[in-house]
Amino acid sequence: MEKLQEKIAKRAYELFQARGGQHGYHIADWLNAEKEILKVTAAPAGQAKPAASKAPAVASKATPAPASMLRKKR
């Protein structure tokens, strides 16, 4: 079974590709993929898990990065 982080990374890459490989949305892609994957894995027992959408979930504005993900430039 794929690890959770691998599933998220794979889905984030699918979102990147669906947008035509446009750079600058890696954090939004990761967060959207994480939301989709966690929603699917959290489905109650006995219920069908929803299929992940193949359409890119792109916000109209760039999503700011969480402070924990930002690097300090030196």
Image (cartoon, rainbow, N blue to C red):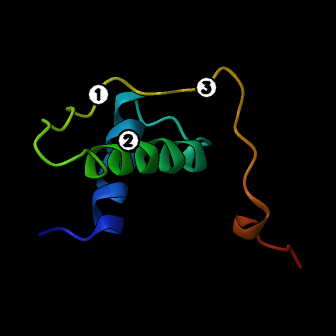
- Classify mark 1: residues with Cα within 10 Å, few (<14), some (14-19) or many (20+): few
- Rendered residue at 53%/27% (across/down): 58
The amino acid marked with disc number 1 is Ser
Residue 35 at x, y = what percent? 45, 45
Q: Which residue is mark 3?
A: 59
Q: Is residue 14 above or below residue 65?
A: above
Sooner in the amino-acid sequence: mark 2 or mark 3: 2
The residue pinned by badge 2 equals 36
Query: Tag on residue 53?
Result: 1
Pick the residue in front: 64 or 39. Answer: 39
Check disc 3 and give the amino acid type: Ala
Contact between marks 3 and 1 (CB within 8 A): the answer is: no
Residue 17 screen position, x and y as percent: 35, 37
Determine crowd level at label 2: few under 14, some 14-19, many 20+ residues with C-alpha closer than 10 A: some
Q: Residue at x 73, y 69 (%)?
A: 68
Label 1 element class: loop
Across the whole image, how many numbered discs are drawn on residues? Answer: 3
